[in-house]
Amino acid sequence: MLSSLLVESSVDVSIKQLLICIVVSVLLGLLVAYVHMYRNIYSKNFVITLAVLPVLVQLVIMLVNGNLGTGVAVLGAFSLIRFRSVAGGAREITSIFWSMGIGLATGMGYVSYITIFSLIIALFLLVLNTLHFGEKQKLAEREVKITIPEDLDYPGLFDDLFQHYTYSAYLDSVKTTNMGSLYELRYRIKLKDSRMEKELMDAMRIRNGNLTIVSGKVSTNREEL
């Protein structure tokens, strides 16, 4: 049932076999594109690429068909494309790898195998995204900028508050502002509960004389594998 549709070691592929492989590649490519779009930020060009990629990879695999020299040339072409492309996030890379896997399988004739495999993976990913699997609910990482007057001794000034409201707190930088009359402290903290952020800020305002306090998300690069 899950054996190859194509005859092994054969260079002749019938029109019927070719059309079956192409149709399966197109349908499964659309499935990958739909799963990628589900509750995700995406671009039109990227999802079109996901839908077309299985057919393109299938074409390449059928052209190689056991020819070592052609296989090495194809490997070089794929490497060139990879190193001239910007690395995406984890979900983008997963979708691309899935699409290429479909093209590899259909190019070798394993139509039933890749169809069952893709349906299971699609269902699994949809369930995980629907259940918000892996999302942080209470724990929140914040970058806090606190302005204090120059007469305050800032080492240990907020340690008791951080011990109560956070799991960890690190002083990243200190700089002077307003001609040296103020200090700006920059902390990176992990809140025990994001709902207690206002309570923490109110407590810090009492310590710093109600001067400016800025709390925001930690600036990081896009998640990459």
Image (spheres, rainbow, N blue to C red):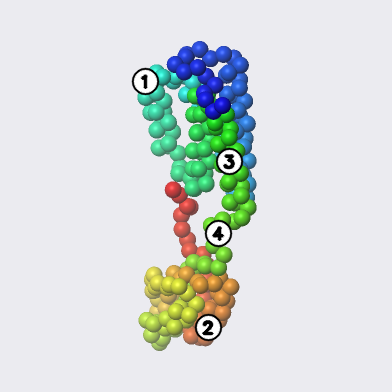
Neighbour tally class for label 2: few under 14, some 14-19, many 20 plus, Cα within 10 Å: few
Do we see residue 29 in this rendering?
A: no
Q: Nearer the viewer, mark 4 or mark 3?
A: 3
Image marks 2 and 1: residues in contact by CB distance under 8 Å = no
**Amino acid type, mark 4:** Glu
- Residue that carries the numbered disc 2 in the rendered image: 203
Residue 130 vs 150, above or below: the answer is above
Q: State how far apart marks 2 and 1 are (Cα).
A: 69 Å
**Amino acid type, mark 3:** Ile
Q: State how far apart marks 2 and 4 are (Cα).
A: 28 Å
User: Sequence-wise, which precedes: disc 4 or disc 3?
Assistant: 3
Neighbour tally class for label 3: few under 14, some 14-19, many 20 plus, Cα within 10 Å: few
Q: Nearer the viewer, mark 2 or mark 1?
A: 1
Neighbour tally class for label 1: few under 14, some 14-19, many 20 plus, Cα within 10 Å: few
Q: State how far apart marks 4 and 3 are (Cα).
A: 22 Å
Image marks 3 and 2: residues in contact by CB distance under 8 Å = no
Q: Quadrant of the N terminus?
A: top right
Q: State how far apart marks 3 and 2 are (Cα).
A: 51 Å
- Residue that carries the numbered disc 3 in the rendered image: 120
